[in-house]
Image (cartoon, grey):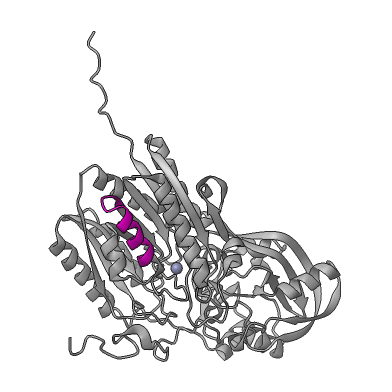
Amino acid sequence: MAHPPPAPRILPVKLFIAAIGTETNTFSPIPTGWSAYREDLFVRRDASQSSPHWFAGPLRVWRKAAEAAGHEVIESVAAFAQPAGPTRRTVWAEMLAMVLADLDAAGPVDVVLLNLHGAMVAEDEDDCEGALAAAIRARRPAAIIAVELDLHCHISDRLMAAADIVVTYKEYPHTDVDARAEDIWRLAMATHAGEIRPVMASIDCRMLAVWRTPRQPVRGLVDAMSAREGQGGVLSVSFAHGFPWADVPDVGARMIVIADGDAAVADRVARDFQRQIWDLRYQTRDTLLTLDEAVAAALSPELGVTVLADVCDNAGAGTSSDATFLLEALVAAGARDVLTGFFWDPVSVKLCFEAGIGSSMPLRIGGKVGPFSGRPVDLDVTVLALAENAQITYGNGKQALGDAALVAAGGIHIALNALRTQTFHPDGFAALGADIGDYRSVFVKSAQHFSAGFAPVANRIRYVSAGGAADPDFEKIRLPRAGRPLWPLVEDPFAGN
Ligand SMILES: [Zn+2]
């Protein structure tokens, strides 16, 4: 009996992986130092095996795929800080040095896979991702370098030159973090095997906006991007929405297309999608309620649960998450059956824990970080629930809320927490015994990520502009360092070009 032919021998690949992220709001008064990383995610060498953090998700994807194939993985830093102001210069320098020291210790590597946010600004570095990728390229000129980014990123020429493969999330809310990590894996491995030769084009859209991908016409555009992949030599299509609250030279949206060996194809397809996004600019614009309209919505007798997003005070965009503009107005209007949160207020949380469940006391809520926070609101409250080290679901992972408390002030229930983060999911409220189905209106401090978890249980969703450090009024935003015209600051940013 003949033996079966031997399986082709696949040489083991040596991989170097790391993850560093934060989204820097250069208008935020909150500094980002070591504790911001340590209380969120900072693990060196084994985050993929030890941390449930969502930002370590791509590392888990890559390690699992690599080990299944018998490849060698060297893992370096995994770090994430809740978005805020610029990262301190010494923190960035130390973190960069750690990654490079780990790379030096690893010796030669075939493939470098990086999960980066893409909008990290340090005190003396506008483009941390470009700096990291360029430093790795300088040390490993022959390695394949592939980078995954949040779509809220700045794309620099330095990053594009240093990396072979750049892929951003396609979805906002970011439900595809791990799916894009799988794309990165496939593209990097096919490149290493010599099956493809990725070439990238990056086209500046010269636009500042927020695009919500579950809604048309953005949904159709994202579906068209996915459908284009695998057709006519196109390997990957990414729409980097950009992160507008950053006065840096690369602020603004970009289209990135990767083609197989043909730069002209990459360029043509990127320009085609850039034009589509531009042509849809008025249709994709947000409709936001004013503060007065939001209060009226909370008082209206509409049946079912209305979820209202306090988009200007979204910790995910670097804000304080303690702005009281809406809370103050809801109290003044005598609103009832309202749940609102999460307010970042460690002092109030501490007082609630000290008082205990069932206690009644005066409490000064929110309004503490700066002018974007509004005034503190003094209320007589009853402590309804307490939760130690609470967590909230985000994508395939968890985000820490820290200690949390639920208090009642008249007909308004207010959720407070000790670790600043946005209100990603109803299970954060559930950790305090609050079921959003029991309320007529629920105000969440989040711009869009909440919708993945809240949309299935909400009867309607409204977006509110009520003041904060992430105001989406891009006709008025001041970005003197952007270095080129951007819509909607100007009507036609391409005029004269
Ligand atoms: Zn994002």
**Residue 395 seen from this side:** no
| Left or right of 456, for residue 389 | right
Give me the residue at 55% from left, 84% from top.
Answer: 468
Figure quadrant, ligand 1: bottom left
| Quadrant of the image occupied by residue 261 | bottom left
Label count reads 0
**Depth check, front residue: 288 or 45:** 45
Q: Is residue 133 magenta?
A: yes
* 274 left or right, relative to 450: left
Give the image location of residue 451, x and y in percent: 51, 67
Q: In which quarter of the image is the C terminus?
A: bottom left
The location of residue 52, given as percent across then percent down, is: 56, 51
Q: Which residue lies furthest to the top in this view?
A: 1
**If the image is split into quadrants, where does the N terminus sit?**
top left
Position of residue 240 relative to residue 390, above or below, is below
Q: Give the range drawn in magenta.
A: 130-144
Asked whether 482 falls inside the magenta stretch, the response is no
Q: Residue at x 30, y 49 (%)?
A: 188
